Image (cartoon, rainbow, N blue to C red):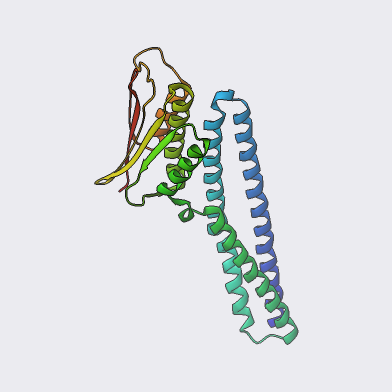
Amino acid sequence: MQQKEVYIAIIFITLIIIIFIVGILLIIYQYRKKKLLHLSERNSMALHHQEELHEATLQMQQLTMQDIGREIHDGVGQRLTLASIYSKQILHKNIADESKQKMEEVSNLINESLIQLRVLSKELINEEEHVVALNELLLKEVEKIEALDVCKIKLTLSDEIYFRHNQAMFVIRILQEFIQNSLKYASCTNIDIRLQKDGTHLVVHIMDNGKGFDTHGKYQGIGLKNMKKRAEMIHADFIFESVINKGTQLTLKLNIS
C-alpha cells in the first residue's frame, strides 16, 4: 500500500512538472506574440513619431513583463507549492528507504524550481525598483548641456523629489525637448531651470532668453505637440508662453502626494 502511494505521488509530481513546463512555454509564446505585435506597430509609424512610439513600446513591454511575472507567481508557482507540500507529507510516512531517497530528490528539485521561479517573477514585476530621484536625472542632463559650451544653464533645486521611473522620464523628455528647441531655434545664451515644492505639488519651471515666437501664429512644431502630449500622459498642468525678442518659458505642475 505504501509503495502504491509512492507511485501515485511520483505520478502526481510528474504531472505538476509537466503543467509547469507547458505553462512556461505558453507564457513565452504569448510574450513573443505581443513583442512581434509591438514591432509591427512601430514599423508602421512615421519617422517623426519613432521616439514617442519607442517610449510607449517600452511601457507596454514593462506591463507585459509584469503580467507574466504575476502569472508565474500566482499560477504556476502556487501549483508547484502544492506539489512541494504534498511530497513533504509523503516523506513523513513510513516508506522504504530507497523510495524515500527518490522522493527527497523530487522534493528538492521542486523546491529549487520554486526558488528560481520566485526570483524570476520578482524581477519581471519589478515595480518598487522603478522609483528614481528627479533631481539626479536633472543634474545629469544639465552636465550634458554644459559640456557643449554653447549655453549657460542655471539649475535651482528644492528637496529631493522621487517619482516612478516612467513619470520622471516624461518630465525629463519634456525638458530635453524645450532645451533642444532653445538651442536650435531661439539662439539663447541662458536657460534657467527651477524645481519647487508647492504643498502636494511640484512646480517645474524652465525659461530661456532667446528670440521667442508667436504662440498664436501658425507654429505647429512637433516638439511643442510632444511636450503637451507627455504632460497630459502624466496629468501635469502645462503652461507654455513665448514673447518675441523676450524668450520662452514653460511651467509644469505635478501632483506629488
Asked if residue 105 is positioned above or below residue 73 in the image, the reply reads below
Q: Residue at x 48, y 29 (%)?
A: 180
Between 18 and 136, the one nearer to me in the picture: 136
Choose top left, top right, bottom left or bottom right for residue 228.
top left
Furthest residue to the right?
Answer: 98
Percent from the top left, x then y, of residue 161? Answer: 36, 50
Percent from the top left, x then y, of residue 9? Answer: 67, 73
Residue 1 visible to the viewer: no
Between 233 and 141, the one nearer to me in the picture: 141
Q: Residue at x 54, y 26 (%)?
A: 49
Asked if residue 203 is positioned above or below residue 228 in the image, the reply reads below
Choose top left, top right, bottom left or bottom right for residue 77.
bottom right
Between 179 and 232, the one nearer to me in the picture: 179
186 relative to 201 in the view: left or right: right
Q: Residue at x 34, y 46 (%)?
A: 157
Asked if residue 93 is positioned above or below residue 196 in the image, the reply reads below
Looking at the image, how many numbered discs can be counted on the residues?
Answer: 0
Q: Residue at x 37, y 41 (%)?
A: 155
Choose top left, top right, bottom left or bottom right for residue 79.
bottom right
Percent from the top left, x then y, of residue 119? Answer: 58, 62
Between 44 and 238, the one nearer to me in the picture: 238
Percent from the top left, x then y, of residue 66? Answer: 53, 50
Quadrant holding the N terminus: bottom right
